Amino acid sequence: MKITLSVIKADIGSIGGHIRPSQRLIGAVRSHIMQHGNDMLRDSHVSSTGDDIAILMAHERGPGDEEIHRLAWEAFLAGTAVAQEQGLYGAGQDLLKDAFSGNVRGMGPAVCEFEFDERPSEPFLFFAADKTDPGAYNLPLYLAFADPMNTPGLMLAPSMTAGFRFVIMDVNHTEGDRIIELEAPEDLYDIAVLLRDTERYVVESIWSRASGEQAVTVSTSRLHNIAGKYTGKDDPVMLVRVQKDFPATGEILAPYAIGPYVAGCMRGSHQMPLMPVPRNSDISYFDGPPVVSCTAFSMHDGKFTEPVDAFAHPFWDKVRDRVADKAIDMRRQGFFGAAMLPMSELEYTGIMEKLQVLDGRFRLRD
Ligand code: 13P
Ligand code: 13P
Ligand code: MG
Ligand code: MG
């Protein structure tokens, strides 16, 4: 049967700063989905990562469906009312428009979704990251889908040896979706040229070249492109189908052991290492570090199994220790050099106003 998986995610308020939503807030979003989504949804799962709440939904209505998007938008409105009542910080932070207009894309919430013929066994992974932006997935996806040093399946599995097609979006282009399609392995160097620039070029989807099936969908929204000013990071969500024609779960997870430096953390303005964390983790050190959680599901007829926490395994404790060391090392250099993002990424914040004032005070010496 044809199933659509949709994830719609927003920050609508959190306790003690940008740390985590309250249980009541998550409860309000969940019960709205339960009460109003019954006729439309095969299944749903509401979870939080840092201060973000993600609604994962299985249905048969296809991507971009107005009623599915409206359901999520209204669930976030119901949650925002609770956030206001409780005095949570940033109540309604990511709901940037007043009225719903048919689709939550361009309204603040992050969206990733795809439709496929459900396999007899349909294992998939749901990733959610906080205090970073969609480019954070560029390196893990490149390694998992294009590098045999990470993914032996590219050599061993007959259905994978044809490689994968990467659809990459220029997220600075705000007038529409500007995309390029590149094929691994032939276009490997071109893919690398783009993916190294995580603030501009973001993997949007990945497709099996052997079967034509879609493996990956990533949310690509940039909040400052919507709001025209800094309103928070673009905390990305991603769905990855695994096994058979696609990399194994372990091949998808392995790159997160690197703890690569990504954009984000404090005030969305720094470079800090990405820490793989258990589900429903909080935020702490320096409004970070940037975190990523991964939940594994299997699905049949659009019904989910119970969630399995992919980064809860003791292996990742060691990785977290190393990432914490990297984070502290980077913070030792404060505002200096690579610790902060380049000016282009700070353009809508106070530093630009300061620079303008200072610019007027410069003079040419006689
Ligand atoms: P399957 O062959 O059962 O898909 O699993 C692949 C595998 O060996 C994972 O490491
Ligand atoms: P969020 O985007 O997760 O709300 O974080 C905002 C921030 O800048 C924290 O320092
Ligand atoms: Mg927040
Ligand atoms: Mg957030």
Image: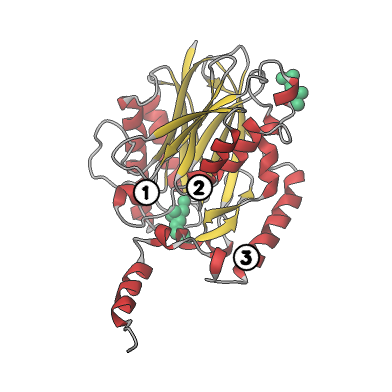
Number of other residues with Cα within 10 Å of mark 2, as a class: few under 14, some 14 to 19, many 20 or more: many
Q: Between 142 and 228, which is closer to the camera in this rendering?
A: 142
Ligand 1 lies in quarter: top right
Q: Residue furthest front?
A: 366
Q: Amino acid at mark 2?
A: Thr
Q: Mark 2 near ligand 2 (CB under 8 Å)?
A: no
Is residue 55 rendered to the left or right of residue 358? right
> Mark 2 or mark 3, which is nearer to you?
2
Q: On screen, 241 above or below 72?
A: above
| Residue 253 x/y as whole percent | 67, 37
Q: Amino acid at mark 3?
A: Met
How much space separates mark 3 and mark 1, taking CA atoms? Answer: 26 Å
Q: Amino acid at mark 1?
A: Leu
Q: Residue at x 44, y 46 (%)?
A: 200
Q: How is the image coloured?
A: secondary structure
Is residue 10 rendered to the left or right of residue 227? right
Residue 223 badge? 1
Mark 3 and mark 1 residues within 8 Å of each other at the beta carbon: no
> Quick one: SS at disc 3?
helix
Q: Residue at x 42, y 17 (%)?
A: 60
Residue 198 badge? 2
Q: Residue at x 66, y 66 (%)?
A: 329
Q: Mark 1 near ligand 2 (CB under 8 Å)?
A: yes
> Quick one: SS at disc 1?
helix
Q: Residue at x 66, y 22 (%)?
A: 243
Mark toward the start of the polypeptide (2 vs 3): 2
Residue 330 badge? 3
Q: Between 310 and 222, which is closer to the camera in this rendering?
A: 222
Is residue 297 rendered to the left or right of residue 169? right
Mark toward the start of the polypeptide (3 vs 1): 1
Number of other residues with Cα within 10 Å of mark 3, as a class: few under 14, some 14 to 19, many 20 or more: many
